[in-house]
Amino acid sequence: MSTKYVYFFGDGKGEGNGKMKELLGGKGANLAEMVNIGLPVPAGFTITTETCTHYYANNKQFPAELKAQVEEAIKKTEKAMGAELGSKTNPLLVSCRSGARESMPGMMDTVLNIGMNDDTVQALAKHSGNERFAWDSYRRFVQMYGDVVLDLKPRSKTERDPFEVALEHKKEKAGVTEDNQLSVAQLKELVEEFKALIKDRTGKAFPTDPMEQVWGAIGAVFGSWGNDRAVVYRRTYGIPHEWGTAANVQAMVFGNLGDDCATGVGLTRDCAIGTPGFCGDYLINAQGEDVVAGIRTPLRIEETLAKDMPSAHKQLDDIGIKLEKHFKEVQDIEFTIQRGKVWMLQTRNAKRTGFAAVRIAVDLLEEGLIDEKEMLAKRRIPADDLNQLLQPIFDPASKKVAEKEGRLLAKGINAGPGAASGKIVFFADDAEKMFEKDPKTDLILVRRETSPEDLRGMKAAKGILTAFGGASSHAALVSRQMGKACIVGCGALDINYEAGTITVGDKVLKSGDFLSMDGFTGEVFEGKVTTKPSEVIQVLITKTMKPEEAETFRRFDKLMKIADKHRKLRVRTNADLPNQAEEAIAFGAEGIGLCRTEHMFFDHLDEIREMIVADNLEHREKALAKLLPFQRKDFAGLFKAMDGKPVTIRLIDPPLHEFLSDAHLETDPKLADKLAKWSGKSVEEVKKRVEELHEFNPMLGHRGCRLGIVYPEITRMQARAIFEAAVEVQKAGVKVFPEVMVPLAGFAAEFKNQEKIIRETAEKVFAETGTKVEYMVGTMIEIPRAAVRADQIAENAEFFSFGTNDLTQTTLGMSRDDYGPFIGFYRENDIIGNDPFQQIDQDGVGELMKIGVERGRKTRNKLKIGICGEHGGDPSSVMFCHKIGLDYVSCSPFRVPIARLSAAQAAVEG
Ligand code: ADP
Ligand code: MG
Ligand code: MG
């Protein structure tokens, strides 16, 4: 049997349908689908993408069977339209249109009005009773065919289209400004001039045989798959070159027959903010490309079409409703109105912003077009896009002005979504002071990079901008946790702390100058760009808006509630402070998955430093005793805020030199003296002790449970603070549920060592206070050995939490503080597909996670398992966690809604 290369559509029936996008391309499949559901579509046929593949594989030759199949399809088209190609009484004209599996807007070619020659133009004039229209169509055809098929298109940006030049001369000579003001005689002259141009450039006469024209156009459409523009586009968007395009040959309908005709493009509802109702552009008495070509300014469908053409407007509305009912999605359509009748030429699912995505999904549900599961579909609302509803945004008009004025300075990695505008400040303590003086000042903290000591300065700033670091650098991580706009790795910025300047090219900005940054895009602007907080934030966090006044919030909330109903994964948050915890609860967090206790130490550096320089147990315990009340108070605050929800507290994790190092001694000249006084040692001895703390590879050094094992008194103090706080809060009538987490254990013995101290301390506190508190002791799984020996660790550990930041570092042997210089190269050269610190490396790290889950649960079948790395807020990683059977994910407060939606998407899409 010979291969079927051609699929006809018309007379109320398509041989293909909407599901056949691979074979028929998006445009062809949906043209057939529209015919099948009874919409008015001019008849025609689709030549398959396989034909295109064949064409390229065979030296640009068509398959032998194609000719007969095309000729037969042309006959059917002629019959359906009641007109004939080349007829001298009632000629059929066709278009030949490209259309790949995925839309590649404007990248490939289309030819309109095929079938025109000196005879058919006369026939068309007579048949339509409109001579001007006939010659206008002829003029357009020769021009388009010349450009697309005969290759007269300009080859460089500076070159001009020869036909456009001729057209302009003609208009000038005639003293008119618009194409449609040219007379019939002038159009006739133009056709002759165009033909002469072609003869002159190609050495051949313009082809007059309609069938020859059709074949020329088909070849050109296939050829356009291989043009430079299309190739570059595919590379950018990851579309395989093997796919090929389909070619759609379709009977022409005319929007240029008079004032009861038009052509247009539209959306079945607005896709920027999601408002219901048909909207779009149209042009009266015009053809196809005119609307997008910007030759004349189009009119707005929602504003004037009802008045201009009431019947056509009604038809369009009905078509929009029918399309949405059928496709269950907003459609992006192309149409032509011929003598008052609407003809459909294209439809596809419309692209939209996060705002529109949420509104449209909820509206479609409320209108009964889709059910809850369909509403949650990942392609409908990419979970990450929820960010747009949470973050302050730039006022679009103000951003446009900044761009126009040339104030775009540089682009970095968009690490924390949100827009911020404020004064440049280089030092965290300056930021803090300025903020204390005037909490209303908007500040942008600009650093080469940030460290834990910058925390309070970061809190004071509206946005954080760094010249170095990647998407999981300290700055990025902390900003996301705080929900602040953040751009990192903005290498174009030359930051000079001493001079207090940022230099970008020939521009120099000083401390105190205004800077604006768009964390959604990574763009940095000089000067001010106006921002505003999102509605969702105003309701949930700042409480400056009532839920009932907030339409966007209402839909967001509905979406979240439905997501909660369908998801299996629980969602927790990474939070160290009561106010972060409260924000996270407002966003729907069901517990704390990671409280990093060392953040608390940074607020009490004196005491921890005293502990570090002490050289005997007694002295260390004395210093630790000073820290105890601070920790207890912090934990009590967290327990209260979480009100009975589980709180996972991780014991101290970073190496001690993060609290005390040579660099600290250098920047604070009085510090060594102070330490000497505290420890009763000489300054020299103190310096030596500090030097000892230095590590060559801190990531793999004396940190995590290794600290608590060597210095059990630290674990003892932390456990005591946790249980005393728990008892205190429980006595006050608030439920508590602490989960004490041991970091970085790889050997079961490491865990057991720490577990013993924790449980003994708990028992002591319970005995002292006469109150018992329910609690668990578990561990992070963050080095490969722990995953592999999860069976042994689970004998004692009551829960696991995958620390995927460290697990990724240790599995890949790749430091997340040092991967910046090569990761970009790796991604551009397809060495690895994604940033493994943003999306779980499923084949590697993910495999270890699977082993950890499997072996852990073999020992303890109800073992509670979660994830608390940055990946816990990444949609693809959340879906993976669902798949391997975790109980919960934990992420920064502002990513909680994203995790809730991702978890639901994992549950409904599997
Ligand atoms: P693109 O993929 O670049 O949008 P199309 O193949 O959709 O290219 O063609 C562009 C425009 O040309 C269409 O939106 C439509 O307005 C016009 N057009 C194409 N085919 C026809 C036709 N058979 N009748 C009338 N107009 C057409
Ligand atoms: Mg189109
Ligand atoms: Mg870790």
Image (spheres, rainbow, N blue to C red):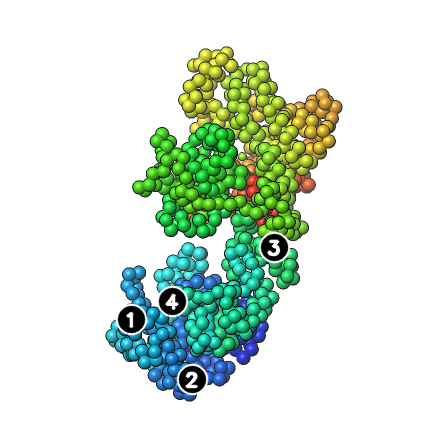
Mark positioned earlier in the residue sequence (4 or 3): 4
> Which disc, if any, is residue 823?
none
Can you identify the residue that label 1 sits on? Answer: 172
Mark positioned earlier in the residue sequence (4 or 2): 2
Amino acid type, callout 1: Glu
Q: Nearer the viewer, mark 1 or mark 4?
A: 1
Amino acid type, callout 4: Ile
Amino acid type, callout 2: Gly
> Which disc, if any, is residue 129?
2
Instruction: State the separation of the CA atoms marked 3 and 2.
Output: 53 Å
Can you identify the residue that label 4 sits on? Answer: 295
Q: Is residue 856 above or below residue 247?
A: above
Instruction: State the separation of the CA atoms marked 4 and 2.
Output: 26 Å
Q: Position of residue 440 (x, y in %)?
A: 50, 36
Foreground of the two, 872 or 630: 630
- Residue 357 in which image quadrant: bottom right
Instruction: State the separation of the CA atoms marked 2 and 1.
Output: 28 Å
- Residue 777 in which image quadrant: top right
Contact (CB < 8 A) between labels 1 and 4?
no
Q: Position of residue 382 (x, y in %)?
A: 54, 53
Q: Position of residue 659 (x, y in %)?
A: 49, 25
Q: Is residue 235 above or below residue 446?
A: below
Can you identify the residue that label 3 sits on? Answer: 376
Measuring 60% from the left and 24% from the top, which residue is drawn there? 630
In the image, taking residue 519 as reference, residue 854 lies left or right, namely right
Under tag 4, what secondary structure? loop
Instruction: State the separation of the CA atoms marked 4 and 3.
Output: 41 Å
Q: Nearer the viewer, mark 1 or mark 3?
A: 1
